[in-house]
Image (spheres, helix red, strand yellow):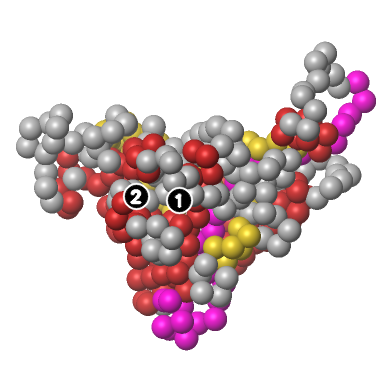
Amino acid sequence: MFPEDHETWNVQLFRSIDGGAAFGFPRLLKTLPELGLLVGRIISLIVAFKMLILMLFDYFLGSSFAWSADDIKPEDVGALHLIPKELSLKIVSKIEAGERFTVYVVVPMWPEGVPESASVQAILDWQKRTMEMMYKDIVQALRAKGIEDDPRNYLTFFCLGNREVKKSGEYEPSEQPDPDSDYQRAQMARRFMIYVHTKMMIVDDEYIIIGSANINQRSMDGSRDSEIAMGAYQPYHLAARQPARGQVHGFRMSLWYEHLGMLHDSFLRPESEECISKVNQIADKYWDLYSRESLERDLPGHLLRYPIGVASEGDVTELPGYEFFPDTKARILGGKADYLPPILTT
């Protein structure tokens, strides 16, 4: 470190690995961060930081041991990594302490693949169960404190999309999509999903982790996909006595401007209820513009509400009128695929 350089960075590299590939692999979770193991570092960030987590991943599922056992045996699913449960427990601990903690999660509308396919529908079903487990934890904590509040003011999910009106003189492709296909319907409606391929987490505007790992068992298992990530912070821009205002904060603000199409004073305090209410309000409006039948002008921003509802008990439900993603025949909440073993979809 150069003491005179207040823009210096500290950077650490993380990887996924297990005892089958490394002699002396630790058995205790608390030792994982020191050895640079990815899942341990993410969990330590969730536990240690104070106010805010912003996550962008193209898969978000896990902690299946805590899912409702209504029509499945959670122990047979095997998506056991702790990250979603640690997130909801962190929010619960802050509610119990009377403090703010806010988690923003951005995922694609559906993961890579044909949205109606059995594999994608199974992944969406696991994702729905993960969200539901987290929201039920939050609802129970709010009730225990006698607080009447929307759980989306503590944990909220988004996706990205764009929609543009047709302009004079724009390019017209020589070939047309197949009739009654998702592609044709999307072209007619002038809208498309923006696929979230980022694997990134920003914590308290002071720490960022970027890499190849998703929030699923394949990435976090250690013995399946091989993953790598970089964690970084600026030691002169930590949220010790005042909010962090370094380059991580600047990057987060630029992302919000890019996808919300605007700035607001509350964005400087992303953990605040004012901020998350504002972002949810904008994302709700953009989802309405994205999904309605007609469009009068270009969509002003890309951040859309993920099209789910949260019932009073924390159950994840369909938004009224939205069983399927626009322009598709794919159910938003997914569905079980009994003939696909969970190891293929978790």
- Residue 258 to residue 66: above or below: above
Tags 2 and 1 touching, CB below 8 Å: yes
Could you tell me the amino acid type at mark 2? Val
Q: In the displayed structure, does residue 211 sit left or right of residue 184?
A: left
Is residue 143 inside the magenta stretch?
Answer: yes
The residue at 35%/57% (across/down) is: 73
- Is any atom of residue 90 visible in this view? no
Between 5 and 142, the residue placed more toward the observer is 142
Residue that label 2 marks: 77
Percent position of residue 281, x then y: 68, 61
Quarter of image, res 309:
bottom right
Percent position of residue 236, x then y: 35, 46
Mark-to-mark CA distance, 2 and 1? 9 Å
Q: Quick one: label 1, few (<14), some, or many (20+) residues within 10 Å?
A: many
Quarter of image, res 192:
top right
Q: In the displayed structure, does residue 320 sit left or right of residue 173?
A: left
Q: In the displayed structure, does residue 100 sit left or right of residue 115?
A: left
Percent position of residue 308, x then y: 61, 58
Residue that label 1 marks: 126
